[in-house]
Image: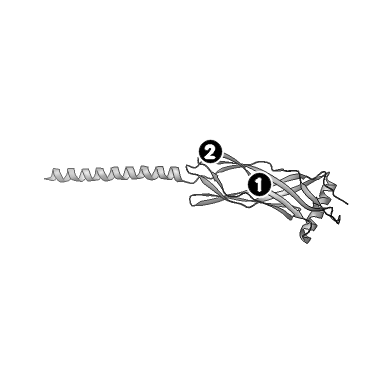
Amino acid sequence: MGDGGSSRCCKIFGIVCAILIVLAIAIGLTVFFLFPRIPETQVGQATTSKPAYTRNPTGNPPIKDLYVNVTVPVNITNNNYVDINILSIDLKITHEGDPIGVSDTGYTNIPKRQLTKFDILAKIYVSGEDPNSAAYMARLLIDAQQNNGKVKVLIKGPVTVKYLTVTTSFDINQTTEVDMSGIPTSR
């Protein structure tokens, strides 16, 4: 009679151990595949388009509106086993502290386990009609005149990435030159 109870107890113990081992393996695999890995990012050098402008009929300042497209190339390697999403890109473009542009790239999906290359697009727009922008325009034109048409601008801001319930961000902070040669800087 003692042998039957001991045998039954060993069977139950064996079954419980097997269930615990399977459960531990399942938890381990789940953690391995779903544990968030921070994406590797590389931000390339920003490039700008040739500026477009409209002349000011009064001549002071000589330009009424200035438009420049800015492209910031980004490489993101997603080492996760699920897709990640870029929720927001909040870049600000400044010249000597003056706000002159913002990014306009929206939601981007980064597929699992691969490198994705995409461009963050931003626009510089300065209007001579707005009193603040007229002052920004004057400083831009003076800087262009003093530096052979080259104007340095700062591109700065966070890029926010979401993976399942984890949100992280990386910063872009770089200076690039806008070639404003050929734009009238005086009357």
Q: Residue 114, which numbered label?
A: 2
Q: Which of marks 1 and 2 is nearer the N terminus?
A: 2
How far across and down, in percent of the image, does residue 68 sit?
73, 47
Image quadrant of residue 10? top left
Label at residue 121: 1
On the picture, is 51 further left or further right than 14? right
Residue 149, label in figure: none
The kind of secondary structure element at disc 1 is: strand
Specify whether 86 is left or right of 155.
Answer: left
Where is residue 111? Give x, y as percent.
Answer: 52, 42
**In the image, farthest residue toward the top:** 114
Give the structural element (helix, strand or loop) at label 2: strand
Which of 106/94 is in front?
106
Residue type, numbered disc 2: Gln
Residue drawn 41% across and 44% down?
A: 30
Q: Residue furthest left?
A: 1
Q: Quadrant of the N terminus?
A: top left
